[in-house]
Amino acid sequence: MKRRTFGAFAAAGMVDLSSLTKSAFAADAPSALPAGLTPFGSEQAGNAAGTIPAWTGGMTETPKGVNWDPEKELPPDFFADDPMLYEVNAGNLEQYKHLLSDGVIHLIKNSGFSIKVYPTHRTQAMPEWVYKNIAQNATRAQLDPHGGRFGFSGGYGGVPFPVPDVSKPYDAGSQIIWNHETAWEGHYVTKVLSTWVVQSGRPPVMSSYGRDHFISPYYDPNGSLEGFKGYIYKYAGTNLGPATTIGNQTVYFASINTLKQPNIAWQLLAGQGRVRKAPEISYDTPNSFDDGIGNYDETNGFSGALNEYDWKFIEKKELLVPYNNNKLFHVSVKDAHGPKFINPDFVRWELHRVWVVEATLHPGQRNVLARRRFYVDEDTWTITTGDAWDAKNDLYHTAMNTFAVFPNLPGVLIQNNFLYNVQTGNYVSQQGAWGNAPFNQPYSFATISETVVEPQAMAAAAAY
């Protein structure tokens, strides 16, 4: 198959990518993307208005004067002294609608939601070896010849498509979402996370709480494209609560190509003593971890196989998104969850550039979410907000990912995913660490044994 080239992209105030063809990656710049781009493919310059700054390297060290022990504490709010620039609410919504997603507009207009906007900080950073891999991926990664919705090859150790081919909108859409699926989170991550459901305006109820382990073979610093076996990450989660779910375990492998190597999951239900494959943990199956408010493929905005949808790049634009939300790590569950939405006082919004991608069901495929639109941050390549419509084309769900910065990794990671059912008024906060025990344990990026994420080990531990 002919390797892709980089198509033209031009918009007011943004980098003109028309010259970024394969020839731009000549031997005189083997470890860098074309001029004007960061090492991960975003626009290095700020915007013309000065409301988005230039990227100058991100946050790779704890700022001077900040006392923080990453081994004992969640990261602090590094921008606590920033003044709020303005607040968007129902009274001034028209002035800012062009900077908001449809779902956020709906919540502001119909539910009393508001957002508080602060100065933009471009904190994303990665190790140098990841930057080098991204530069190599730019000319070697390619979508599956059967279609980008099935997968890709030729990418390793960094986002595979740092310069999406926007001359082919459907290819570019798939490339951008694969960048989201392979976004940098480190080689090893261990988190203690909880999920909370708010229904009918009542106080939050914990639907799941547990310890999650992630190993990313795709981001093994000692690995290589030649030795890569095709799994982006391997996940193992153990439920620590509520009482009825203690001891339940899940193992999940995420693939770069579901035609060649499907995603696969296994589950152990406490008391049964055996492990089963769990193909139902996919697509639009209601997510048992969030009481069915969302589906498994809505985790982190979107998660899982891409094959049910055709993915189309729409535009690149400026958008207000939740960003640098370390403050949420230090808020209690009770204070954070309001009757209709997360407490706006604790969520920081910033202006960033995003790639807009729309997903429509491929002919013959079925999903309760007939159309979806995602806004992917240019620096992290991660979905910031997303909206979904049902078969009647009525707005159904809206998702928001809050991001937190970890200079000890370094990197910017999804901290919490909020999913709202705008038709019922219920919502869920997924996979969050919070300020009160036992939900306030720090993330660990220390080595994890491979046996932790293997179903055989789960089965051996469960047998009786």
Image (cartoon, rainbow, N blue to C red):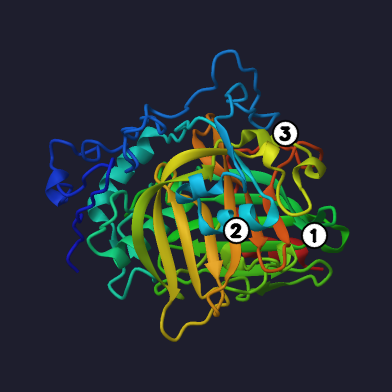
Question: Which residue is at a point 26% across and 58% down the rendered structure image?
Answer: 166
Q: Secondary structure at mark 1?
A: loop
Question: Which residue is at a point 21% across and 60% down the rendered structure image?
Answer: 4
Question: In this picture, is 149 found above or below 448?
Answer: below
Answer whether residue 151 is visible to the viewer in this image: no
Residue 341, how many percent across, how many down?
A: 71, 52
- Which residue position is annotated with label 3? 330
Identify the amino acid type marked 2: His
- Name the front one of labels 1 and 3: 3
Other residues around mark 1 within 10 Å, as few (<14) / some (14–19) / many (≥20): some
Q: How far is mark 2 from mark 1, CA to CA?
A: 39 Å
- Which residue position is annotated with label 1? 247
Residue found farthest to the top? 65
* Quadrant of the snapshot with the C terminus: bottom right
Other residues around mark 2 within 10 Å, as few (<14) / some (14–19) / many (≥20): some
Find residue 396 and report its image quarter. Answer: bottom right
- Name the front one of labels 2 and 3: 2
Question: Which one is in front, 281 or 64?
Answer: 64
Q: Considering only order in the chain, which callout, 3 or 1, is on the residue closer to the N terminus? A: 1
Q: Secondary structure at mark 3?
A: helix
Q: Considering only order in the chain, which callout, 1 or 2, is on the residue closer to the N terminus? A: 2
Q: Is residue 43 left or right of residue 117?
A: left
Residue 259, how many percent across, how many down?
A: 40, 75
Label drawn at residue 210? none
Question: Which one is in front, 153 or 167?
Answer: 167
Q: Considering only order in the chain, which callout, 3 or 2, is on the residue closer to the N terminus? A: 2
Question: Which one is in front, 135 or 85?
Answer: 85
- Which residue position is annotated with label 2? 106
